[in-house]
Image (cartoon, rainbow, N blue to C red):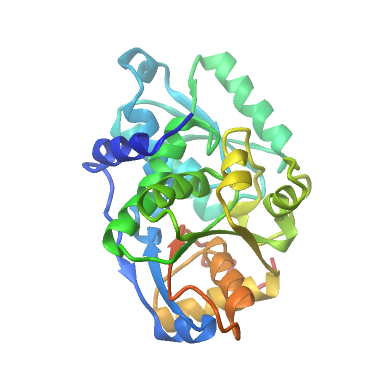
Protein backbone atom coordinates (compact mmCIF):
# COMPACT_ATOMS: atom_id res chain seq x y z
CA UNK A 1 0.00 0.00 0.00
CA UNK A 2 0.99 3.64 -0.51
CA UNK A 3 0.52 6.36 2.11
CA UNK A 4 0.82 10.12 2.24
CA UNK A 5 4.15 9.79 4.04
CA UNK A 6 5.44 7.90 0.99
CA UNK A 7 4.52 10.91 -1.15
CA UNK A 8 6.28 13.29 1.25
CA UNK A 9 9.41 11.13 1.26
CA UNK A 10 9.30 10.85 -2.51
CA UNK A 11 9.25 14.63 -2.90
CA UNK A 12 12.29 14.98 -0.67
CA UNK A 13 14.05 12.18 -2.56
CA UNK A 14 13.45 13.47 -6.08
CA UNK A 15 13.70 17.23 -5.47
CA UNK A 16 17.34 17.40 -6.63
CA UNK A 17 16.35 15.95 -10.02
CA UNK A 18 12.98 17.53 -10.91
CA UNK A 19 11.56 20.97 -11.60
CA UNK A 20 9.07 22.45 -9.16
CA UNK A 21 6.68 23.39 -11.93
CA UNK A 22 4.75 26.67 -11.92
CA UNK A 23 1.07 27.41 -11.47
CA UNK A 24 -0.46 29.33 -14.40
CA UNK A 25 -3.86 31.01 -14.63
CA UNK A 26 -5.87 32.03 -17.67
CA UNK A 27 -8.95 34.27 -17.47
CA UNK A 28 -10.26 32.96 -20.79
CA UNK A 29 -10.36 29.41 -19.37
CA UNK A 30 -11.92 30.69 -16.14
CA UNK A 31 -14.70 32.23 -18.22
CA UNK A 32 -15.42 28.94 -20.01
CA UNK A 33 -15.83 27.02 -16.76
CA UNK A 34 -17.23 29.88 -14.70
CA UNK A 35 -14.73 29.58 -11.88
CA UNK A 36 -11.02 30.07 -11.16
CA UNK A 37 -8.62 27.45 -12.50
CA UNK A 38 -5.04 26.97 -11.35
CA UNK A 39 -3.00 25.02 -13.90
CA UNK A 40 -0.14 22.93 -12.51
CA UNK A 41 2.18 22.93 -15.52
CA UNK A 42 3.89 19.56 -15.73
CA UNK A 43 4.37 20.29 -19.42
CA UNK A 44 7.39 22.21 -18.10
CA UNK A 45 8.69 19.17 -16.20
CA UNK A 46 11.90 17.44 -17.27
CA UNK A 47 11.14 14.93 -20.05
CA UNK A 48 8.02 17.01 -20.68
CA UNK A 49 5.57 15.34 -18.30
CA UNK A 50 4.71 14.45 -14.70
CA UNK A 51 5.90 10.91 -15.39
CA UNK A 52 9.48 11.96 -14.61
CA UNK A 53 8.50 12.24 -10.95
CA UNK A 54 7.45 8.61 -10.57
CA UNK A 55 10.25 7.23 -12.73
CA UNK A 56 12.88 9.13 -10.75
CA UNK A 57 11.44 7.99 -7.42
CA UNK A 58 11.36 4.36 -8.55
CA UNK A 59 14.97 4.38 -9.77
CA UNK A 60 16.22 6.24 -6.71
CA UNK A 61 14.94 3.36 -4.59
CA UNK A 62 16.74 0.63 -6.56
CA UNK A 63 19.85 -0.99 -5.14
CA UNK A 64 23.22 -0.82 -6.88
CA UNK A 65 22.88 -4.43 -8.04
CA UNK A 66 19.41 -3.74 -9.45
CA UNK A 67 20.66 -0.67 -11.33
CA UNK A 68 23.41 -2.79 -12.87
CA UNK A 69 20.73 -5.04 -14.41
CA UNK A 70 18.89 -2.19 -16.11
CA UNK A 71 15.17 -1.41 -16.10
CA UNK A 72 12.33 -2.36 -18.41
CA UNK A 73 8.84 -1.01 -18.96
CA UNK A 74 6.02 -0.65 -21.48
CA UNK A 75 4.60 2.76 -22.27
CA UNK A 76 2.75 4.72 -24.95
CA UNK A 77 5.17 7.55 -24.52
CA UNK A 78 5.59 9.79 -21.49
CA UNK A 79 6.61 7.10 -18.99
CA UNK A 80 8.94 5.75 -21.65
CA UNK A 81 10.75 9.06 -22.01
CA UNK A 82 10.73 9.69 -18.28
CA UNK A 83 12.22 6.30 -17.45
CA UNK A 84 14.86 6.61 -20.16
CA UNK A 85 15.93 10.01 -18.84
CA UNK A 86 15.93 8.82 -15.22
CA UNK A 87 17.95 5.75 -16.25
CA UNK A 88 20.54 8.02 -17.85
CA UNK A 89 20.82 10.02 -14.62
CA UNK A 90 21.26 6.88 -12.51
CA UNK A 91 23.67 5.26 -14.96
CA UNK A 92 21.60 2.27 -16.00
CA UNK A 93 20.07 0.85 -19.19
CA UNK A 94 16.41 1.37 -20.08
CA UNK A 95 14.54 -1.16 -22.24
CA UNK A 96 11.25 0.32 -23.43
CA UNK A 97 8.38 -1.51 -25.14
CA UNK A 98 6.24 1.01 -27.05
CA UNK A 99 3.04 0.48 -29.04
CA UNK A 100 3.50 0.96 -32.77
CA UNK A 101 1.01 3.85 -32.72
CA UNK A 102 3.04 5.88 -30.22
CA UNK A 103 3.87 9.33 -31.55
CA UNK A 104 7.19 9.69 -33.33
CA UNK A 105 8.30 12.52 -31.07
CA UNK A 106 7.92 10.29 -27.99
CA UNK A 107 9.84 7.46 -29.62
CA UNK A 108 12.58 9.91 -30.58
CA UNK A 109 12.73 11.28 -27.03
CA UNK A 110 13.31 7.81 -25.58
CA UNK A 111 16.12 7.16 -28.02
CA UNK A 112 17.70 10.57 -27.36
CA UNK A 113 17.99 9.66 -23.66
CA UNK A 114 19.66 6.36 -24.56
CA UNK A 115 16.63 4.09 -24.15
CA UNK A 116 16.34 0.95 -26.28
CA UNK A 117 12.92 0.90 -27.99
CA UNK A 118 11.08 -2.29 -28.96
CA UNK A 119 7.79 -1.72 -30.77
CA UNK A 120 4.72 -3.92 -30.30
CA UNK A 121 1.08 -4.11 -31.32
CA UNK A 122 -1.06 -1.38 -29.67
CA UNK A 123 -2.73 -3.67 -27.11
CA UNK A 124 -2.14 -4.06 -23.39
CA UNK A 125 -1.49 -7.78 -23.86
CA UNK A 126 1.24 -7.11 -26.43
CA UNK A 127 2.84 -4.48 -24.22
CA UNK A 128 2.93 -6.77 -21.20
CA UNK A 129 4.22 -9.71 -23.22
CA UNK A 130 6.98 -7.62 -24.77
CA UNK A 131 8.17 -6.27 -21.43
CA UNK A 132 8.08 -9.73 -19.85
CA UNK A 133 10.14 -11.19 -22.70
CA UNK A 134 12.83 -8.51 -22.33
CA UNK A 135 12.87 -8.93 -18.56
CA UNK A 136 13.51 -12.65 -18.89
CA UNK A 137 16.18 -12.13 -21.52
CA UNK A 138 18.12 -9.33 -19.79
CA UNK A 139 17.27 -9.64 -16.10
CA UNK A 140 16.18 -5.99 -16.11
CA UNK A 141 14.04 -4.72 -13.23
CA UNK A 142 10.40 -4.06 -14.27
CA UNK A 143 9.23 -0.50 -13.62
CA UNK A 144 5.53 -0.40 -14.54
CA UNK A 145 4.12 2.87 -15.91
CA UNK A 146 1.55 3.33 -13.14
CA UNK A 147 0.67 0.20 -11.14
CA UNK A 148 3.59 0.37 -8.70
CA UNK A 149 3.78 1.92 -5.21
CA UNK A 150 6.94 3.90 -5.91
CA UNK A 151 5.45 5.27 -9.13
CA UNK A 152 2.22 6.28 -7.37
CA UNK A 153 4.16 7.99 -4.57
CA UNK A 154 6.30 9.87 -7.08
CA UNK A 155 3.30 11.03 -9.11
CA UNK A 156 1.62 12.21 -5.91
CA UNK A 157 4.36 14.81 -5.48
CA UNK A 158 2.73 16.82 -8.28
CA UNK A 159 -0.48 17.40 -6.30
CA UNK A 160 1.54 17.83 -3.10
CA UNK A 161 3.45 20.70 -4.71
CA UNK A 162 0.27 22.19 -6.16
CA UNK A 163 -1.49 22.17 -2.79
CA UNK A 164 1.48 23.89 -1.19
CA UNK A 165 1.54 26.51 -3.96
CA UNK A 166 -2.24 27.12 -3.80
CA UNK A 167 -3.31 26.03 -0.36
CA UNK A 168 -7.05 26.73 -0.45
CA UNK A 169 -8.25 24.75 -3.45
CA UNK A 170 -11.85 23.54 -3.30
CA UNK A 171 -11.32 20.84 -5.93
CA UNK A 172 -8.58 19.16 -7.94
CA UNK A 173 -8.72 17.31 -11.23
CA UNK A 174 -6.27 15.10 -13.11
CA UNK A 175 -6.51 13.02 -16.28
CA UNK A 176 -6.91 9.26 -15.83
CA UNK A 177 -5.00 6.70 -17.88
CA UNK A 178 -3.53 3.92 -15.79
CA UNK A 179 -4.38 5.85 -12.65
CA UNK A 180 -0.94 6.46 -11.14
CA UNK A 181 -1.27 10.26 -11.21
CA UNK A 182 -4.86 10.08 -10.01
CA UNK A 183 -3.93 7.79 -7.12
CA UNK A 184 -1.11 10.03 -5.97
CA UNK A 185 -3.40 13.05 -6.33
CA UNK A 186 -5.92 11.38 -4.03
CA UNK A 187 -3.27 10.69 -1.39
CA UNK A 188 -2.04 14.29 -1.31
CA UNK A 189 -5.45 15.92 -1.55
CA UNK A 190 -7.21 13.82 1.09
CA UNK A 191 -4.38 14.60 3.54
CA UNK A 192 -4.01 18.33 2.90
CA UNK A 193 -7.53 19.29 1.76
CA UNK A 194 -9.79 16.51 3.05
CA UNK A 195 -13.01 18.32 2.09
CA UNK A 196 -11.90 19.20 -1.44
CA UNK A 197 -13.62 17.48 -4.35
CA UNK A 198 -11.46 15.13 -6.43
CA UNK A 199 -12.29 14.69 -10.09
CA UNK A 200 -10.77 12.45 -12.73
CA UNK A 201 -11.17 12.99 -16.46
CA UNK A 202 -11.15 10.60 -19.41
CA UNK A 203 -11.84 10.62 -23.15
CA UNK A 204 -15.23 9.14 -24.02
CA UNK A 205 -13.38 6.74 -26.32
CA UNK A 206 -11.25 5.37 -23.49
CA UNK A 207 -13.62 5.48 -20.52
CA UNK A 208 -12.70 2.40 -18.49
CA UNK A 209 -12.40 4.40 -15.25
CA UNK A 210 -15.81 6.00 -15.83
CA UNK A 211 -17.39 2.61 -16.48
CA UNK A 212 -15.58 1.02 -13.53
CA UNK A 213 -16.61 3.82 -11.18
CA UNK A 214 -20.26 3.51 -12.14
CA UNK A 215 -20.35 -0.28 -12.00
CA UNK A 216 -18.26 -0.63 -8.83
CA UNK A 217 -16.15 -3.27 -10.61
CA UNK A 218 -12.85 -2.90 -12.43
CA UNK A 219 -13.55 -2.95 -16.17
CA UNK A 220 -10.43 -3.27 -18.36
CA UNK A 221 -9.69 -0.98 -21.27
CA UNK A 222 -10.18 -2.99 -24.46
CA UNK A 223 -10.16 -0.88 -27.63
CA UNK A 224 -9.37 2.76 -26.80
CA UNK A 225 -10.11 5.24 -29.56
CA UNK A 226 -8.75 8.67 -28.70
CA UNK A 227 -6.12 11.18 -29.77
CA UNK A 228 -5.21 11.47 -26.06
CA UNK A 229 -2.52 8.79 -26.35
CA UNK A 230 -1.46 9.10 -22.71
CA UNK A 231 -4.92 7.97 -21.56
CA UNK A 232 -5.33 4.73 -23.52
CA UNK A 233 -4.14 2.40 -20.75
CA UNK A 234 -6.18 0.40 -18.23
CA UNK A 235 -6.38 0.88 -14.49
CA UNK A 236 -4.34 -1.51 -12.33
CA UNK A 237 -5.15 -3.37 -9.14
CA UNK A 238 -3.26 -0.74 -7.09
CA UNK A 239 -4.81 2.28 -8.77
CA UNK A 240 -8.42 1.10 -9.10
CA UNK A 241 -9.19 1.32 -5.35
CA UNK A 242 -8.29 5.03 -5.36
CA UNK A 243 -10.72 5.62 -8.23
CA UNK A 244 -13.38 3.55 -6.52
CA UNK A 245 -13.06 4.98 -3.01
CA UNK A 246 -11.57 8.47 -3.23
CA UNK A 247 -12.49 10.06 -6.56
CA UNK A 248 -15.80 11.90 -6.40
CA UNK A 249 -16.58 11.83 -10.10
CA UNK A 250 -15.08 10.90 -13.47
CA UNK A 251 -15.72 13.52 -16.15
CA UNK A 252 -15.67 12.76 -19.88
CA UNK A 253 -14.52 14.57 -23.03
CA UNK A 254 -15.30 13.87 -26.69
CA UNK A 255 -12.65 14.02 -29.40
CA UNK A 256 -13.83 17.24 -31.04
CA UNK A 257 -13.87 18.93 -27.63
CA UNK A 258 -10.36 17.70 -26.82
CA UNK A 259 -9.04 19.07 -30.10
CA UNK A 260 -10.79 22.43 -29.71
CA UNK A 261 -9.74 23.03 -26.09
CA UNK A 262 -6.17 21.91 -26.79
CA UNK A 263 -5.99 24.57 -29.50
CA UNK A 264 -7.72 27.13 -27.25
CA UNK A 265 -5.11 26.61 -24.52
CA UNK A 266 -2.28 27.00 -27.03
CA UNK A 267 -3.79 30.23 -28.33
CA UNK A 268 -5.08 31.84 -25.12
CA UNK A 269 -2.99 30.46 -22.25
CA UNK A 270 0.14 30.46 -24.46
CA UNK A 271 1.33 27.05 -23.25
CA UNK A 272 1.91 23.87 -25.25
CA UNK A 273 -0.18 21.00 -23.97
CA UNK A 274 -0.74 17.53 -25.39
CA UNK A 275 -4.27 16.18 -25.99
CA UNK A 276 -4.43 14.40 -22.61
CA UNK A 277 -4.18 17.78 -20.84
CA UNK A 278 -7.27 19.13 -22.58
CA UNK A 279 -9.41 16.30 -21.22
CA UNK A 280 -9.75 17.64 -17.63
CA UNK A 281 -10.55 21.14 -18.89
CA UNK A 282 -13.25 19.82 -21.22
CA UNK A 283 -14.63 17.76 -18.35
CA UNK A 284 -14.86 20.85 -16.14
CA UNK A 285 -16.58 22.86 -18.86
CA UNK A 286 -19.17 20.13 -19.39
CA UNK A 287 -19.69 19.69 -15.63
CA UNK A 288 -19.77 23.27 -14.38
CA UNK A 289 -20.41 25.78 -17.19
CA UNK A 290 -23.76 27.41 -16.45
CA UNK A 291 -24.05 25.68 -13.06
CA UNK A 292 -24.68 28.03 -10.14
CA UNK A 293 -23.08 25.98 -7.38
CA UNK A 294 -19.50 25.04 -8.15
CA UNK A 295 -16.04 25.01 -6.55
CA UNK A 296 -14.54 28.50 -6.47
CA UNK A 297 -10.91 27.41 -6.96
CA UNK A 298 -9.95 24.26 -8.90
CA UNK A 299 -6.44 22.88 -9.32
CA UNK A 300 -5.91 21.30 -12.75
CA UNK A 301 -2.91 19.07 -13.36
CA UNK A 302 -1.56 19.77 -16.85
CA UNK A 303 0.07 16.40 -17.32
CA UNK A 304 2.47 16.97 -20.23
CA UNK A 305 3.50 18.83 -23.35
CA UNK A 306 5.05 16.20 -25.62
CA UNK A 307 3.39 16.93 -28.96
CA UNK A 308 4.24 15.75 -32.46
CA UNK A 309 4.26 19.05 -34.34
CA UNK A 310 3.63 17.20 -37.61
CA UNK A 311 0.44 15.62 -36.27
CA UNK A 312 -1.45 18.44 -34.58
CA UNK A 313 -5.11 17.37 -34.34
CA UNK A 314 -6.50 20.56 -35.84
CA UNK A 315 -4.23 20.16 -38.86
CA UNK A 316 -4.87 16.49 -39.54
CA UNK A 317 -7.52 14.16 -38.16
CA UNK A 318 -5.98 11.52 -35.83
Q: Is residue 279 above or below residue 230?
A: below
Q: Residue 294, percent across and down?
A: 52, 76
Image quadrant where residue 16 sits: top left
Residue beneath the point at 41% across and 38% down: 153
Q: Is residue 131 above or below residue 312?
A: above
Residue 314 appears in view: no
Tag count in the figure? 0
Q: Give the left or right position of residue 192, taking residue 203 as reference.
A: left
Name the outermost residue toward the front.
Answer: 195
Q: Give the left or right position of residue 281, taking residue 45 as reference.
A: right
Foreground pick, 207 / 170? 170
Residue 267 appears in view: yes
Q: Is residue 139 above or below residue 223?
A: above
Foreground pick, 277 / 5? 5
Q: Residue 84, percent across and down?
A: 42, 37
Name the image quarter holding the C terminus: bottom right
Image quadrant where residue 128 sits: top right
Name the outermost residue toward the left.
Answer: 16
Foreground pick, 306 / 240? 240
Q: Give the left or right position of residue 306, taking residue 220 as reference.
A: left
Q: Residue 135, percent across and down?
A: 56, 19
Amino acid sequence: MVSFSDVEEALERISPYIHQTPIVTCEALDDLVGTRLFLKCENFQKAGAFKFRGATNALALLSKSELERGVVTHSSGNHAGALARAAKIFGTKAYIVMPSNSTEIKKAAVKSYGGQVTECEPTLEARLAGAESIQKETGAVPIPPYNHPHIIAGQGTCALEMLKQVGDLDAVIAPVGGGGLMSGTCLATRQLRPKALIFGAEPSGADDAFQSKHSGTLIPQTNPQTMADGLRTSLGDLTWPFIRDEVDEILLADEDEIRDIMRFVWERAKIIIEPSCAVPIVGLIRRFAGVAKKPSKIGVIISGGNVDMEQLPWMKKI
